[in-house]
Amino acid sequence: MEPLAWRKIKSQGFVLFWMILGFIALIPVLSLVIVVVVRGLFALFFDGFSAQNPYYAQALLYSFLGTIIVAILTMLVASPITLFSALYLSEWLSGKRLAFLMTWLRAFSDMPALLTGMVIVLGFPNTNSTWVTLLYLAATLTAIGLPRFIRTTYDVFRTTSPILREGALAIGATKSQMIFKVLLPSHRAQVLAVYLQQLARVIGETASLLLFVKGGQAIFLSVAIDHAVVNASYDALTRAYGFAFLLLLLILMILWLARRITNSANRML
Amino acid sequence: MGESVTAFEISAYYGQKKVLHNISLTIIPGEITAIIGPPGCGKSTFVRCLNRLIEATPDAKVTGQVKLGGIDITTLPKEEVRRKIGMVFASPNPFPTMTVFDNVAAGLYLQGIKQRSEVADHVERTLRMASLWDEVKDRLQRPALALSLIEQQQLCIARALAVSPDVLLLDEPASMLSPMGTLQIEEIIDDLKMHYTILIVTHNLQQAARVADKTAFFLNGELIEFSDTMDLFTTPKDTRTEDYVTGRFG
């Protein structure tokens, strides 16, 4: 039996350890906020559109809108594919075929998916059309994100208590009625929350890989940050902080919304 | 009055594993039949065979025949079988995003019955049968999950009754409830037996003794004994039944 005093020390040690880690994680966020506050509105100055130089004030709005449009296009393409694939996996497949597909999804939802995305991006045509580039980026992000989207949505459906399914079937519902009138309405909040989390990933994390391969146009905030940092002038760096601050705010807002939705759904269940 | 349900030589498999061994049993209208047995003996699997709900389980297979009022249930669409043989589960499972009213009406909506007055009549009648009308008549548009656990289970009974079944299968309907809740459910079951054929699965021997007219004892997927409840508890024919009801195992 461990002495009580030693257990107390260990538990307090763990708390201290996590507090230090949390503080370290906060440093980049705090530095962003401080820079934006200290250098003033210049970092966040919206003044029309410009695709040419991301460290000009005009590029902020341009990159911000580009990020939003690509994220929305990605979700528009990925959401229905994700929903129906997850439903197919959870409601129709079983046994070895399901196990095989889930193994494939797990394997591709992390690093290999990023590699796939980079290969796709390499095939981008050289175009000056902003819209074509946006569409290509959305297609790439869809390809990258799909395995993870499907896996996460599948998990939402699989965690449904079987008695909910059985409850619907027991009153004479067909399988499609069970899915579309009971299962989906019961999980719309969780599915929406999953989509929002994926949206945040698309905006923040996954998009950044694109700049390694195809950083020609400062369409994304993350790409614009890279351009501004590479430029390395005082104004450009300030602009980079402004971009990063905005990106962070956007992601935090989406994650907060996803959290609220999940919490309210959990309270309801 | 409900219809009789007869099971002939029912065997069930999950994958390669045989979990029910040639069960033959007749459930008579106007009576309450109980199935007792230790956990994992195949009670719930058996009732799922009766309304073809077992077909929703991947890798499950059933052989044998079930007749509802003399009609082989495999000749009917499975949705119709499930409407005629309603089921209530151990955990209350109201549809979480629906109101109290819509939960009861769900089965009617699925059948295409949309006329508000007809649906409302059905809802009120079945909520009264489940002894829930007085409690919820002013809360029909509230979420079903806002009800207490016992009310949720009563709601599930009303939902099962709303599609006008002949038979009601109750799979340990009071296992999650307090003693008072259990008593309330038993009173409802007793009231319903005049209108429906009722089969109740329970691991609670006292409950079977209180509510059932006939009782079947299952062990390891086999039907060991099936007789009047009083006889099964006082003069069991099989030593395994005697051992179980006297508490030597299980």
Image (cartoon, rainbow, N blue to C red):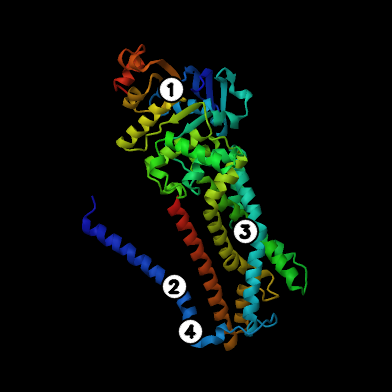
Element under disc 4: helix
Q: Are marks 1 and 4 in contact (CB under 8 Å)?
A: no
Task: Name the foreground residue: B170 vs A200.
Answer: B170
Which three-letter amino acid code belongs to the residue tagged 1?
Asn
Dot 2: within a 10 Å radius of its alpha carbon, few (fewer than 14), some, or many (20 or more) residues? Answer: few
Which residue does the image show at 36% across and 11% down from the upper left?
B237
Chain letter for mark 1, please. Answer: B
Instruction: Provide the residue designation for mark 4.
Output: A37
Q: Which mark is residue B190?
A: none
Are the residues flagged by discs 2 and 3 in contact, CB closer than 8 Å?
A: no
Asked whether B96 or B48 is in front, the reply is: B96
For the residue carrying disc 3, how many other residues have a C-alpha within 10 Å: few (<14), some (14-19), or many (20+)? many
Mark found first going from the N terminus, 2 or 4: 2
Q: Quadrant of residue A11?
A: bottom left
> In percent of the image, x 53 and y 20: which residue is there?
B10
Give the numbered dot on residue A145. Answer: 3
Q: Quadrant of residue A241?
A: bottom right
- What is the CA distance from the residue labelled 4 to the residue labelled 3? 35 Å
> In the drawing, what numbered circle is on residue A26?
2
**Three-letter amino acid code of the residue under disc 3:** Gly
> Residue A12, how many percent across, how many down?
29, 63
* Disc 1 target residue: B220
